[in-house]
Image (cartoon, rainbow, N blue to C red):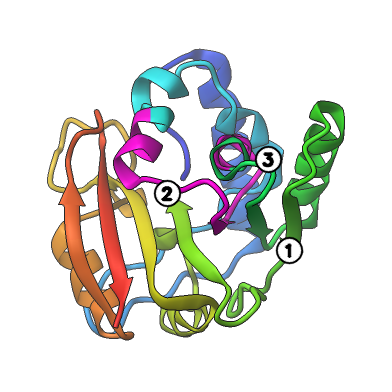
């Protein structure tokens, strides 16, 4: 995810600064060889406050998204690209004390923010995982569900990442992407931070998944549910 077009001036200023910082540190992004989609740049930890903005409830309806996805008590799930833990905490409540959430991110600063939040709220069913750009470092054949909220489009090595994500799923496990709708020009997100259903299907199915369901219940995002073949 990255900066919105419009919105609060303070929020926009934070995101512009983060965008410039990431752009200064990151080489030109690549292009997916199958879809031709250009990869977006990763949002830096300097803009972590945007992940917890109050407007997110209205713009993304996170609880409605999790209702649509369905997370069972006692299941083992992963929040891939967890950031400061906005979705991690909601997932931890849903799996309950008998379940487990692996919260993955490639920025240690993001995981430090999440670690502080977990300690403050005394949440003990979350394991933090520092991943790499080409490997989420998740345990193999362990997960019932992997959730990527506005994250997949930022992968710089999506094909390798998908192969590792597939390895981490149990047989029949689900990979779920939430992505802003590229098909809708009114969604106020920069185009490289949106994805179409066609792009996602083309890219993800090539790595051993099947697009089993598309849910359009959210205000601005696709819910794309893939199953492991």
Q: Position of residue 71 (x, y in %)?
A: 44, 47
Label 2 – label 1 distance at C-alpha: 18 Å
Q: Is residue 91 visible?
A: yes
Q: Position of residue 115 (x, y in %)?
A: 82, 43
Q: Earlier in the sequence, mark 3 or mark 2?
A: 3
The magenta segment: 64-91
Q: Badge 2, how many Cα within 10 Å: few under 14, some, many 20+?
A: many
Q: Earlier in the sequence, mark 1 or mark 3?
A: 3
Quarter holding residue 5: top left
At horizontal 72% and vertical 50% (from top left) the residue drawn is 126
Residue matched to label 2: 150
95 with respect to 118 (left or right):
left
On residue 185, which mark appears? none
Quarter holding residue 56: top left
Secondary structure beneath label 1: strand
Q: Position of residue 171 (x, y in %)?
A: 41, 80
The answer to whether 142 is drawn above or below residue 15 in the figure is: below
204 with respect to 73 (left or right):
left
Residue matched to label 1: 129
Q: Nearer the viewer, mark 2 or mark 1?
A: 1
Label 3 – label 2 distance at C-alpha: 14 Å
> Do residues under tags 1 and 3 come within 8 Å of each other at their CB atoms?
no
Residue matched to label 3: 84
Q: Earlier in the sequence, mark 2 or mark 1?
A: 1
Quadrant (top left, top right, bottom left, bottom right) of the C terminus: bottom left
162 with respect to 126 (left or right):
left
């Amino acid at each position: 995810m990255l900066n919105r077009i419009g919105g609060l001036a303070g929020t926009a200023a934070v995101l512009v600064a983060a965008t410039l910082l990431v752009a200064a540190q990151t080489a030109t992004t690549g292009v997916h060889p199958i879809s031709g989609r250009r990869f977006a740049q990763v949002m830096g930890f300097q803009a972590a406050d945007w992940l917890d903005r109050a407007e997110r409830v209205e713009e993304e309806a996170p609880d409605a998204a999790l209702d649509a996805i369905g997370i069972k008590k006692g299941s083992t799930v992963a929040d891939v690209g967890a950031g400061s833990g906005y979705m991690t905490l909601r997932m931890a409540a849903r799996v309950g004390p008998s379940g487990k959430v692996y919260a993955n991110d490639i920025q240690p600063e993001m995981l430090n923010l999440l670690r502080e939040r977990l300690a403050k709220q005394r949440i003990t069913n979350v394991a933090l995982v520092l991943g790499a750009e080409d490997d989420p470092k998740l345990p193999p054949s362990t997960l019932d569900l992997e959730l990527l909220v506005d994250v997949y489009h930022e992968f710089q090595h999506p094909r390798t990442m998908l192969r590792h994500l597939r390895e981490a799923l149990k047989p029949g496990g689900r990979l779920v992407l939430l992505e802003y709708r590229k098909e809708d020009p009114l969604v106020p997100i920069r185009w490289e931070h949106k994805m179409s259903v066609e792009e996602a299907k083309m890219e993800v199915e090539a790595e051993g998944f099947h697009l089993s369901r598309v849910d359009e219940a959210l205000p601005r995002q696709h819910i794309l549910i893939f199953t492991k073949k």
